[in-house]
Image (cartoon, grey):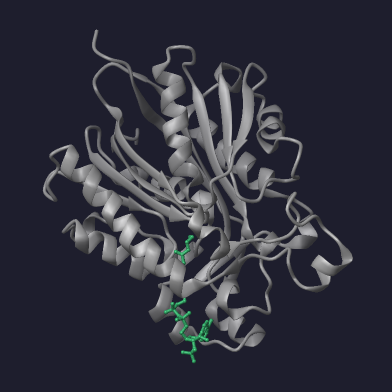
């Protein structure tokens, strides 16, 4: 028997029903559909309305329900649940523990993983390592973010970008050489000042002042983040291909974080991949942070074939970024 690799054996996705279009945003802030579409590629995003009184766990649970139904999996078989999120339900109690209980994963242990928009990518590395250790057989990785909970809908520089959603992927051992092959993950704390939510953590606890000054909303120096994102995401994708001797012909799919269509296009261009091989749904969901990668997998699942070579790439706050090379392990049953 060959080396045990960690393969994705099922995926699920969920986005809330409420659609916030560019036209609707025109009524809320000084912007226009043309600017948003040409600068970002986004046409609409989904929002979990505040009056529903739910957090990111709700999105995560829905995505897992979708996965469990497709896979016909008994949740008590799951060994471990990781929730990748930048918007946990609460800051101290683990969101993953709550999600695991709610989905009936009563034999699992669970924890959250926070690495901004790279959370799911890093989570893939973590999930795969737990599988490769031989200790766990079924690791559930969920990317879930209710970005609307930290967005200032009077700030046109951020409210047009983000949306809510969740996706889930099940990792299991594989002895055919499929699954995660290689990873190139990086971080640089220089990014902390360019993309953050300043208050609510230990550095700047919540106060009347922080609320008044809007410090509980996400802030982004878009232009600077854009420059770092373009060069690092493209660089990571190129490196992972080079060191695995993958040419553009060998790669079946680029799975890029959905932050901005221009960043996705630049990454695809650097590695010489045709648009037909680039997964994209930013036009429908905007940037859902930890959920972009698994939502792509859920949306493209039917097109994926066993043995396909996938290159994942992401960039996010921190800064955090990287790329992963994974061989797809199944054909979806009709
Ligand atoms: O996922 C985590 C990582 N995040 C990212 O990767 C995001 C990276 N950044 C971006 O995607 C882009 O920087 C943005 C989409 C956020 C902004 O696009 P940009 O092309 O970098 O625009 P900009 O910030 O350079 O602004 C250009 C102009 C400015 O006006 P002036 O100063 O040239 O007069 C802005 O005030 O566009 C203005 N502007 C807008 N105009 C209409 C900024 N936001 C808007 C808006 N509608 N919503």
On the image, the x and y values in percent for residue 184 come to: 33, 40
On the image, the x and y values in percent for residue 251 come to: 19, 45
Residue 43 visible in image: no
Front one among 197 and 301: 197
Q: Residue furthest top?
A: 1
Q: Residue at x 42, y 33 (%)?
A: 125
Displayed quadrant of residue 142: top right
Displayed quadrant of residue 206: bottom right
Residue 263 visible in image: yes
Q: Quadrant of the N terminus?
A: top left
Q: Residue at x 28, y 16 (%)?
A: 175
Q: Residue furthest front?
A: 190
Q: Quadrant of the C terminus?
A: top left
Q: Residue at x 48, y 12 (%)?
A: 135
Front one among 285 and 251: 251
On the image, the x and y values in percent for residue 153 come to: 68, 75
User: Quick check: 62 above or below 132?
Assistant: below
Q: Is residue 19 left or right of residue 249?
A: right
Q: Is residue 268 left or right of residue 298?
A: left
Front one among 77 and 219: 219
User: Quick check: 181 above or below 77?
Assistant: below
Q: Is residue 115 left or right of residue 283?
A: right
């Amino acid at each position: 028997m060959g080396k045990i690799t960690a393969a994705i054996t099922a995926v699920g996705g969920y986005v809330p029903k409420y659609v916030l279009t560019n036209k609707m945003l025109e009524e809320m802030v000084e912007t226009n559909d043309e600017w948003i579409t040409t600068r970002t590629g986004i046409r609409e995003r989904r929002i979990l309305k505040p009056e529903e009184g739910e957090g990111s766990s709700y999105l995560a649970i829905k995505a897992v329900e979708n996965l469990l139904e497709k896979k016909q999996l008994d949740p008590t078989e799951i060994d471990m649940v990781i929730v990748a999120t930048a918007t946990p339900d609460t800051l101290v109690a683990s969101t993953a523990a709550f999600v695991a209980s709610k989905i009936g994963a009563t034999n699992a242990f669970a924890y959250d993983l926070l690495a901004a928009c790279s959370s799911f990518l890093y989570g893939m590395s973590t999930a795969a390592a737990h599988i490769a250790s031989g200790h766990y057989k079924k690791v559930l990785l969920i990317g879930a973010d209710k970005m609307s909970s930290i967005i200032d809908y009077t700030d046109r520089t951020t409210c047009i970008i983000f949306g809510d959603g969740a996706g889930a992927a099940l990792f299991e051992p594989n002895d055919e050489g499929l699954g995660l092959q290689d990873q190139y993950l990086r971080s640089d704390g220089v990014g902390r000042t360019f993309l953050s939510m300043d208050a609510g953590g230990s550095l700047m606890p919540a106060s009347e002042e922080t609320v008044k000054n809007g410090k509980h909303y996400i802030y982004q120096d878009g232009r600077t983040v854009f420059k770092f994102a373009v060069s690092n995401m493209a660089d990571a994708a190129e490196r992972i291909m080079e060191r695995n001797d993958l040419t553009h012909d060998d790669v079946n799919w680029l799975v890029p974080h959905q932050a901005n269509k221009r960043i996705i296009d630049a990454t695809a261009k650097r590695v010489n991949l045709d648009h037909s091989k680039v997964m994209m749904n930013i036009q429908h969901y905007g940037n859902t942070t930890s959920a972009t990668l698994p939502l792509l997998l859920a949306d493209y699942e039917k097109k994926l074939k066993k043995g396909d070579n996938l290159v994942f790439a992401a960039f996010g706050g921190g800064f955090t970024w990287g790329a992963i090379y994974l061989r797809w392990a199944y054909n979806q049953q009709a």
